[in-house]
Amino acid sequence: MSGERPGEFELIDMIRSLRGPRPSWLVQDIGDDCAVCEWPLPRRLLVTTDLLVEGVHFPSGRLHPGLIGRKSLLVNVSDIAAMGGTPLACFLGLALPADSSPQDFDSFMRGFLEEASRFGVVLAGGDLSRGDRLTVSVTVLGGVESGEPITRNGARPGDLLLLVGTVGASRHGLEQILSDPGLDLTEAADEASLRQQFADDPRLAGLLAHLLPTIHLEEARWLQGRGLAHAMLDISDGLAGDVGHICKAGGVTGVIDLRRLPLPPSAGCGEQARELALNGGEDYALAVAVSGEQWERIQLEYPAGFRRPVPVGRFIEGLPTVLIEDDAGTRPCPLRSFDHFKPGPR
Ligand code: ADP
Ligand code: MG
């Protein structure tokens, strides 16, 4: 883009050309007042929206725009995964500061669209505006092919609590970024370049977990397709807080077994690592409630190559609260999960 700043319609043209061809079920594409879909999945439309605000969800001026684009898409796909759904289409609302460059816009869009195509999601529309700070609103539409989506409210006393993915590393990564203003994350736009830049750096795992979280979409779809979970969610606020959501929705008590909880390796093995694992946040691991029978079948039939679920606790009859247990006994879990409207850890 030489010289003059592109206008709104040039930006939309850029988006359209970067996105590539439309699937046949997208009858009316970017360019009209609405997208029109011949929805290809027979059951249950899933819709989710997440808002990411510069200075709140990511530090101002610290990250390559490609990383912001990627994460914006990933965290939304994670919500569809959390229901065992298949994401298909997305919509992107973007507020751009007046001084943002066409290069930054291009990097953001390339990152966003690369992740979208990796998960088979087509960008079908959106909106653009000028704004005081970069604000990204993503809506993803998805569905399930059969059966019901896995909601939060099905946990029963006697169920096991499974964890698919890691907890704590993302928060550790965020702390590395915030505590070191000299840490330069403006050069690497993707995982390969982050791996290269931080090849021998112990911070790599945390940075990757925070900037480019792994979304366990196939694992979740597999569980949903076979009806092998009573309740499921993706951990965005912190394991303990989110297990608390399952407890509240299902009217059960959750017990997290600290002896079984995988700790973020780079954060040591003491109290700090445990705190990160329990209350870190932005992990996007899956917390799943399954019966003993379901767990038997999962162990027998689980596909090789999928991230293996780890039993980290159980649900019992009682008040909707979260307990922790170890050799010292069972006690209430100290909860420090993130709340945008309360003073919190971030
Ligand atoms: P309207 O005036 O109806 O809001 P716009 O001029 O904002 O329409 O958008 C024109 C077309 O471009 C619409 O189809 C809209 O979905 C699409 N569009 C606008 N912004 C984006 C974006 N950020 N990503 C994808 N499509 C977009
Ligand atoms: Mg508009």
Image (cartoon, grey):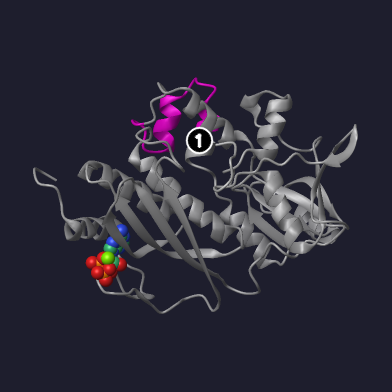
Q: Residue at x 73, y 52 (%)?
A: 244
In the rendered view, does 222 fall on the left or right side of 300?
left
Whether residue 263 is visible here, answered yes or no, is: no
Instruction: Residue at the far left: name it.
Output: 3
Q: Is 83 rendered above or below residue 287?
A: below
Establish if 295 lies above or below 206.
Answer: below
Give the image location of residue 343, x and y in percent.
58, 40
Question: Does the numbered disc 1 mark a residue whose Cβ is under 8 Å from ligand 1?
Answer: no
Rendered position, 179 above or below 236: above
Task: Say which amino acid is labelled 1.
Answer: Leu
**Total numbered badges shown on the rendered structure:** 1
> Could you say which is closer to the camera, residue 3 or residue 209?
3
Give x and y (percent) for residue 239: 68, 45
Q: Residue drawn at (82%, 60%), measured in percent from left and top?
A: 291
Q: Which residue is mark 1?
A: 208
Span of residues in magenta: 186-207
| Callout 1 secondary element | helix
Q: Quadrant of ligand 2?
A: bottom left
x and y, in percent, of residue 177 in the image: 47, 28
In the rendered view, does 34 fall on the left or right side of 203?
A: left
Q: Nearer the viewer, residue 122 or 184?
A: 184
Q: Residues within 10 Å of mark 1 (few under 14, many from 20)?
A: some
Regarding residue 60, the answer to whether it shows in the image is yes
Q: Is residue 141 magenta?
A: no
Residue 332 image position (x, y, % from top left): 82, 42
